[in-house]
Image (tube, rainbow, N blue to C red):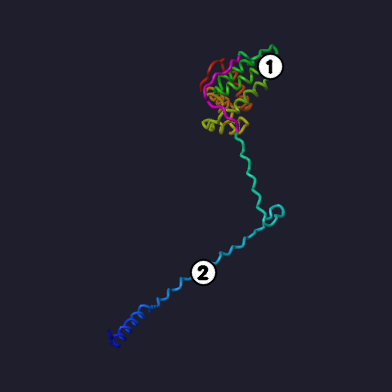
Amino acid sequence: MKLDRSVVLLGLFAAGAAASIAACHVYVDEPAKPPPPAAPAAAPAAQAEPKKVVPIHLHGAVTPGAAPATPAVPATPTGPATCLDTTAVAVGECAAVQASAACSAAPTPQQKCNAYKANFIPKVGAAAVACITALNSTQVCDTTSISTCARTALAQACPVPAVAQLCIIAATPCKTTAADCTTVLSGLSDQGQQAVAQCVAQGCGAGLSACIDGLATASTAASGTLKR
């Protein structure tokens, strides 16, 4: 069979073209990626403020930079002992006072004890009676010892504002202060305050203590529980 040369050439040309196309790679340039954003600049380190050292001179030199000494805390003042109020209590018996034939005439130690018991508020009266009954037979004959028991008991009474007016009047003639007078009268029952008020009205020449001692001459024995 005889082939036309032009046909063969055309076929070869077509085959070559196809092979060329198949072997050809088309490269398309991709757009360039933008560069990554720059990292933010680090914040500048805070500059430490210089510490100020203030020298303190208290009774001597202080080492620079040393911590100041802690000031001493003043001690809390101790308050007075609990005072004796008007609460009713059982009062001891004055019959327990040691009798002595060596004691002077009336008022006897027992009569004085009963007078304080009758004219003092209960707790103060109980304190006075306990003091007097604790005295021995020699001490009870000493009027100073019994008076001291009475004054010591009265000094423990809770202050009563109601007697302040009387004490303002009594302070000068009774040779005492209004504060001391208030302390003494606060420990008296209503009966005792009235008796002392009469003593003041009569001049109180011998002093307030004499008015307290004089309660024994105007009182009768009393016993048991006292109420103001």
In the rendered image, the vertical position of residue 21 relative to residue 105, given as above or below:
below
Circle 1 crowding by C-alpha within 10 Å: few under 14, some 14–19, many from 20: few
Question: Which residue is label 2 attached to?
Answer: 41
- x and y, in percent, of residue 85 in the image: 54, 27
In the image shown, does 8 or 198 lie closer to the viewer?
8
Assign a secondary structure to mark 2. loop
Q: Mark 2 to mark 1: distance in Å?
A: 101 Å
- x and y, in percent, of residue 63 in the image: 70, 55
Question: Looking at the magenta stretch, what is its main secondary structure?
Answer: loop
The three-letter amino acid code for the residue at tag 2 is Ala
The stretch of residues the image draws in magenta is 80-94
- x and y, in percent, of residue 171 in the image: 59, 32
| CB under 8 Å between discs 2 and 1 | no
Is residue 199 left or right of 14 when viewed as pictured?
Answer: right
In the rendered image, the vertical position of residue 217 relative to residue 166, given as above or below:
above
For residue 31, what is the image quadrant? bottom left
In the image shown, does 93 or 7 lie closer to the viewer?
7
Q: Which mark is residue 91?
A: none
The three-letter amino acid code for the residue at tag 1 is Asn
Query: Image quadrant for the N terminus?
Result: bottom left
Question: Which residue is label 1 attached to?
Answer: 136
Say which residue appears at 64% left-offset and 19% top-offset: 132
- Is 78 contained in the magenta span? no
